[in-house]
Each structure stands twice: as C-alpha cells, then as structure tokens.
Amino acid sequence: GQVVGGYRIERLLGYGGMGVVYLAADPLRHRQAALKVLANRLVTNELFVKRFEREASALSSLTHPGIVAMYGKGVDQDRFFFAMEFVEGVSLRDILGKKRLKPEEIAALLVPVCEALDYAHGKGIVHRDLKPENLLVALGGQVKLADFGLARVVHGQEMMTELTQTQTVMGTRDYMAPESRLSAKGADHRVDIYAMGVILYEMLTGEMPIGHFQPPSQKRWMDTRFDDMALKALDPDPAKRYQRAGELARALAQMAPQAPASVIQISCACGKRFYLEPSRAGQSLLCSACGTVLQVPDPFCPECKAELPPGVPQCLRCGTRVKAARR
C-alpha cells in the first residue's frame, strides 16, 4: 500500500545486491509496473547511485519488444527508484529447473534474445550480466531481456562515463568472458556473446562449460552444428567469437523448427470467418454472408518481413508498428 514516486506497492517480486523489486500499480496509467528501489545502505554510496541511475538511462534509450521497457525514474524521500515493464511469467532459470528442452526448442527460444541483444549493442549498450535469471519468458512465450543494471554505455570505442575501476569485476562469474574476469575496463559487447555461449551450452547439456569441456553433442545427442555455434561463442579470444549477436541469431534460426505455412485469418462483424492464403494480403474481400467489404491484413512486417503474430500491432523482431495487424 505504500506509495513511491506515484506507484502503489502491491507485493515483493525479488531482491538482490543493488535493491528490491516490487510489483506496483500505476493508478494514472492503469497498468502494473516492476518498481526497483535502491537499497538504503547504498544511497550514500556515490558510485552505486551513479550505477543505479545509469541503469535507468540505459533502459530508457532502448525501445525493443525483446527488452523490458523503462517507464520512469526518480527520487522519493531519498529513495532512488525506477519503474519498468512488469513481465508476467517466469525466468529461463525457472524453466530449466523444471524441464529439459529439445535442442530445436532451445534454438527457437534464444533467437529473439540474440536479436534483442544485437539491437542493444547497436545502441552502444552492453548488458554485462547475461544469465538465465535475466531472461524473462512471458506467459505467451515471448522472451525479454531484463536487468541492465551492469550495462556499459559506450560511444564508439570511447566510454561516455567510466564508473568502473581497473580491478573491479562486474557480473556473474560463471557467465563472464575471460577478459572481463580480469578487468571490466576494455571489455566490449563480445562479453555478452560469450555469456550467450554459456547459456546455450548450459541449456543443451545441463552443465556449465568450465575448464576443459566437451562439445555439446558428446554430452547429449544432437546436431553437431550446435557444437560449432557453442564453441565459437565460447572462444577465449574475442576476435574468434561471433562479432555480432545477430550472427549467432541467424545460426540458431537455421536450427529452430520451421513454422508451418502462414494462413491469414480475419473475421467479419457478422461473425463469418475467413482463412486465406498469404497471397491475398492487402486485397479486398467481400463477405459472402453479409456483403461487407473487408480489407485483408498483411501477416508480414513491411520492414523486416518477419511474420506478425495474430493480434499483435507491433513486429516482435524489429519493433515496427503495423496498422493492419493480423487478427
């Protein structure tokens, strides 16, 4: 019931070293939000306050369906907070603890993660703490990247703001690239690609790639092409890894199950339903029951040509708003 920055706290969602996350209600916009409040013991720590504010700044610059959206930030009675999109669902860690996914399902799940990561890197933002706990799977199956609290904002090759010290190590060690374990300074976006390699290996084998590890196919029967993907992402030399997360996304997409041929479904106000071939997209249709002229929507994004899920007015791959989304 307590109100922080205009958000009414409903219940605790989780907590970590930097603060506490609550489920909160936004009465003005009639929506729920995840409210992150900086731990009281850190409020007087100038470095942590800057790091907290940087997380909010990083999130606010990212607008992508695969990344948790930022709603706002502020200070209320000396409490630093920011509100972000509440994702109703579970983390990837929760899923891995309950079931073992098929390699093809793993590929399909990680493709949108890599695409969202590629978008963030294009904006000059490195996550630096990728792990299954920070990959949220919504009830509808969409995966979203969360917690850019350790993000590093860069401009080209130069740091916009250097908040880390030479010997400071940030992130979760098992998912950290070799170069970032020694020092956070100088590590670039390829540390995220290494972390994706760890996540991929863990999902495929149920084990962490620690020390001298075997290719995934020697741990579990699967297409040996997964070996090439995992080992390339996990290469200790950043120059030998995938240089962009989008490259890993395209490699994984080749292994994901192919979707069946698209069918456009539209409904008339009279209740009559039509199931049409994709070639009818953009054309007019006369309802055989009442005579109403219907416009057949395009099931593909006009920008990147990705298939649009039924009823979603925004492309999940590139974020393009679509006026005539498939119903």
Image (cartoon, grey):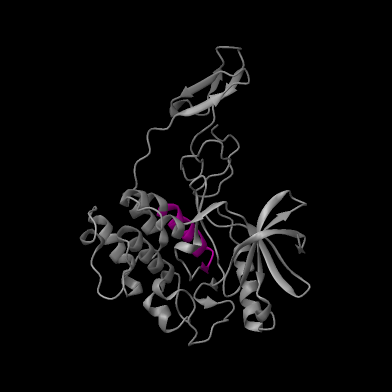
Looking at the picture, how far across and down is residue 92, in whole percent?
45, 57
Residue 320 percent across, percent down from the top left: 56, 46
Prevailing secondary structure class for the magenta stretch in the rendered image: helix
Q: Does residue 150 sit above or below 133 in this rendering?
A: below
Q: Is residue 233 above or below residue 257?
A: below
Q: Is residue 231 above or below residue 162?
A: above
Is residue 222 within the magenta segment? Answer: no
Q: Nearer the viewer, residue 309 or 101?
A: 101
Q: Residue at x 41, y 74 (%)?
A: 176
- Along the horizontal axis of the image, is 71 left or right of 101? right
Q: Position of residue 184 (x, y in %)?
A: 47, 80
Left or right? Give the position of 7 relative to 148.
right
Q: Quadrant of the N terminus?
A: bottom right
Q: Residue at x 50, y 69 (%)?
A: 126
The stretch of residues the image draws in magenta is 110-126
Residue 113 in the magenta stretch? The answer is yes
Can you tell which quarter of the image residue 25 is in? bottom right
Q: Nearer the viewer, residue 15 or 160?
A: 15
Residue 290 on image: x %, y %? 61, 12
